[in-house]
Image (cartoon, rainbow, N blue to C red):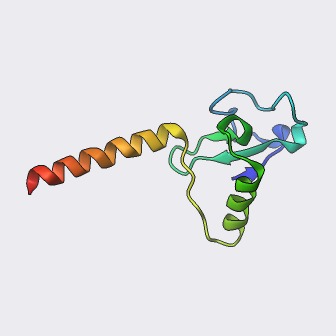
Protein backbone atom coordinates (compact mmCIF):
# COMPACT_ATOMS: atom_id res chain seq x y z
CA UNK A 1 0.00 0.00 0.00
CA UNK A 2 1.14 3.49 -0.70
CA UNK A 3 0.06 7.00 -1.52
CA UNK A 4 0.31 7.58 -5.24
CA UNK A 5 -0.11 10.61 -7.42
CA UNK A 6 -2.46 9.87 -10.29
CA UNK A 7 0.05 11.13 -12.84
CA UNK A 8 2.78 8.88 -11.44
CA UNK A 9 0.67 5.75 -11.38
CA UNK A 10 1.63 4.14 -14.69
CA UNK A 11 1.44 0.70 -13.06
CA UNK A 12 -2.10 1.39 -11.92
CA UNK A 13 -4.96 0.87 -14.37
CA UNK A 14 -7.38 2.59 -12.04
CA UNK A 15 -9.21 1.72 -8.89
CA UNK A 16 -10.60 -1.81 -8.97
CA UNK A 17 -13.85 -0.49 -7.45
CA UNK A 18 -14.57 2.73 -9.35
CA UNK A 19 -12.15 2.43 -12.27
CA UNK A 20 -10.92 5.99 -11.86
CA UNK A 21 -7.37 7.23 -11.29
CA UNK A 22 -8.42 10.17 -9.12
CA UNK A 23 -11.18 10.77 -6.63
CA UNK A 24 -13.51 13.68 -7.29
CA UNK A 25 -13.31 14.91 -3.70
CA UNK A 26 -9.50 14.81 -3.41
CA UNK A 27 -6.58 16.46 -5.14
CA UNK A 28 -4.66 14.09 -7.42
CA UNK A 29 -1.54 14.32 -5.25
CA UNK A 30 -3.44 13.19 -2.16
CA UNK A 31 -5.15 10.07 -3.50
CA UNK A 32 -4.37 7.09 -1.27
CA UNK A 33 -4.25 3.58 -2.67
CA UNK A 34 -3.93 0.10 -1.21
CA UNK A 35 -2.83 -2.95 -3.20
CA UNK A 36 -4.38 -6.38 -2.69
CA UNK A 37 -1.66 -8.84 -1.72
CA UNK A 38 -3.32 -11.61 -3.74
CA UNK A 39 -4.53 -10.13 -7.04
CA UNK A 40 -2.19 -7.10 -6.87
CA UNK A 41 -4.97 -4.76 -7.99
CA UNK A 42 -5.06 -1.23 -6.57
CA UNK A 43 -8.00 0.33 -4.71
CA UNK A 44 -8.72 3.84 -3.47
CA UNK A 45 -8.97 3.62 0.30
CA UNK A 46 -12.16 5.72 0.10
CA UNK A 47 -13.77 3.22 -2.31
CA UNK A 48 -13.15 0.27 0.00
CA UNK A 49 -14.05 2.07 3.21
CA UNK A 50 -10.57 1.99 4.71
CA UNK A 51 -10.09 4.96 7.00
CA UNK A 52 -6.92 7.04 7.27
CA UNK A 53 -6.03 5.52 10.65
CA UNK A 54 -6.03 1.95 9.31
CA UNK A 55 -4.26 3.07 6.13
CA UNK A 56 -1.47 4.64 8.20
CA UNK A 57 -1.24 1.44 10.29
CA UNK A 58 -0.74 -0.63 7.13
CA UNK A 59 1.79 1.88 5.80
CA UNK A 60 3.83 1.91 9.05
CA UNK A 61 3.79 -1.89 9.21
CA UNK A 62 5.13 -2.13 5.66
CA UNK A 63 7.89 0.40 6.35
CA UNK A 64 9.03 -1.60 9.39
CA UNK A 65 8.95 -4.91 7.41
CA UNK A 66 6.03 -6.13 9.51
CA UNK A 67 3.78 -6.45 6.51
CA UNK A 68 0.11 -6.90 7.26
CA UNK A 69 -1.57 -8.61 4.36
CA UNK A 70 -4.58 -6.86 2.87
CA UNK A 71 -7.02 -8.66 0.59
CA UNK A 72 -9.74 -7.08 -1.50
CA UNK A 73 -13.30 -8.35 -1.10
CA UNK A 74 -13.07 -10.53 -4.23
CA UNK A 75 -9.92 -12.26 -3.00
CA UNK A 76 -11.27 -12.61 0.55
CA UNK A 77 -14.36 -14.32 -0.83
CA UNK A 78 -12.32 -16.56 -3.13
CA UNK A 79 -9.89 -17.54 -0.35
CA UNK A 80 -12.82 -18.30 1.97
CA UNK A 81 -14.32 -20.61 -0.68
CA UNK A 82 -10.96 -22.35 -1.19
CA UNK A 83 -10.48 -22.88 2.55
CA UNK A 84 -14.05 -24.17 2.84
CA UNK A 85 -13.43 -26.67 0.02
CA UNK A 86 -10.14 -27.82 1.59
CA UNK A 87 -11.86 -28.34 4.95
CA UNK A 88 -14.62 -30.38 3.29
CA UNK A 89 -12.05 -32.52 1.46
CA UNK A 90 -10.13 -33.16 4.68
CA UNK A 91 -13.34 -34.18 6.42
CA UNK A 92 -14.17 -36.61 3.61
CA UNK A 93 -10.69 -38.17 3.85
CA UNK A 94 -11.08 -38.76 7.59
Q: How far across and down, in percent of the image, does residue 23 sit? A: 81, 31
Q: Is residue 57 above or below residue 66?
A: above
Nearer the observer, 93 or 10 = 93
Nearer the observer, 92 or 6 = 92
Q: How far across and down, in percent of the image, does residue 56 sit? A: 75, 58
Which residue is pictured at 14% across the width and 52% down the height? 91
Which residue is pictured at 70% across the width and 55% down the height? 54
Which residue is pictured at 72% across the width and 53% down the height? 55
Q: Is residue 72 left or right of residue 59?
A: left
Nearer the observer, 21 or 71 = 71
Residue 48, quarter of picture? top right
Number of marks in the image?
0
Q: Is residue 1 left or right of residue 21?
A: left
Q: Is residue 87 left or right of residue 12?
A: left
Q: Is residue 23 above or below residue 81?
A: above
Q: Is residue 5 left or right of residue 55?
A: right
Q: Is residue 57 above or below residue 19?
A: below
Q: How far across and down, in percent of the image, does residue 52 sit? A: 77, 50
Q: Is residue 67 above or below residue 79?
A: below
Which residue is pictured at 8% across the width and 57% down the height? 94
Residue 50, quarter of picture? top right
Amino acid sequence: METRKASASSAVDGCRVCGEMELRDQKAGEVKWVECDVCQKWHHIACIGLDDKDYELLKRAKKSNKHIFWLCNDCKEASFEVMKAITELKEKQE
